[in-house]
Image (spheres, rainbow, N blue to C red):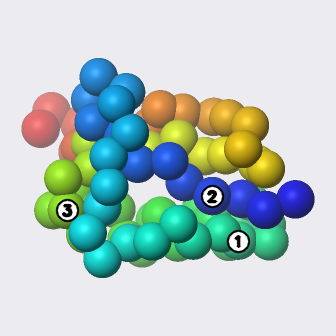
Amino acid sequence: MPWSWRYEKTDGTPVEAPGFGEETWTTQADAESWVGENWRSLLEAGVDQVSLLEDGRVEYGPMSLHPEGG
C-alpha cells in the first residue's frame, strides 16, 4: 500500500505546497524519514501540519510542523 502525506493548514484545511507534489512511498518509515528531512521547507511553503495516509486512510495526524513553543 502506498504511503503519502496530506498537507494542511492549522484548521485542517488541505493546502497545496509549492514545489511538493503528491509523492508516495512504499513504506511508512520512508515517508516518515522524508517528512523529517523536509518539514522546514514544508513550513516555509505554507504547510502548518501533516497527516500520514496509507492508501488514502489516515494512519495518524494531524502532526504540527511548528516547533514547540513557536
Q: Which mark is residue 5?
A: none
Question: Which amino acid type corresponds to the residue marked 2 in the rendered image?
Answer: Ser
Separation of marks 1 and 2 at Cα, in angstroms: 6 Å
Q: Tell me what residue is drawn at x 53 percent, y 41 percent.
A: 51
State the quadrant of the C terminus. top left
Question: Which amino acid type corresponds to the residue marked 1 in the rendered image?
Answer: Trp
Reading the image, the residue beneath label 1 is 25
State the quadrant of the N terminus. bottom right
User: Left or right of 52: which side holds 9?
Assistant: left
Separation of marks 3 and 1 at Cα, in angstroms: 21 Å
Position in image of residue 5 (x %, y %): 54, 54
Separation of marks 3 and 2 at Cα, in angstroms: 17 Å
Q: Tell me what residue is drawn at x 79 percent, y 50 percent.
A: 55
Q: Tell me what residue is drawn at x 27 percent, y 36 percent.
A: 9
Q: Earlier in the sequence, mark 1 or mark 2?
A: 2
Q: Tell me what residue is drawn at x 45 percent, y 71 percent.
A: 21
> Secondary structure under badge 1?
loop
Question: Which amino acid type corresponds to the residue marked 3 in the rendered image?
Answer: Ala
Position in image of residue 3 (x %, y %): 72, 59
> Secondary structure under badge 2?
strand
Q: Earlier in the sequence, mark 3 or mark 1?
A: 1
**Furthest residue in direction left, as rendered:** 70
Q: Which mark is residue 4?
A: 2
Q: Are marks 3 and 2 in contact (CB under 8 Å)?
A: no
Reading the image, the residue beneath label 3 is 45
Position in image of residue 22 (x %, y %): 53, 66
User: Left or right of 36: which side holds 5?
Assistant: right
- Crowding at label 1, few (<14), some or many (≥20) Cα neighbours within 10 Å? some
Position in image of residue 35 (x %, y %): 47, 64
Depth check, front residue: 38 or 1 = 1
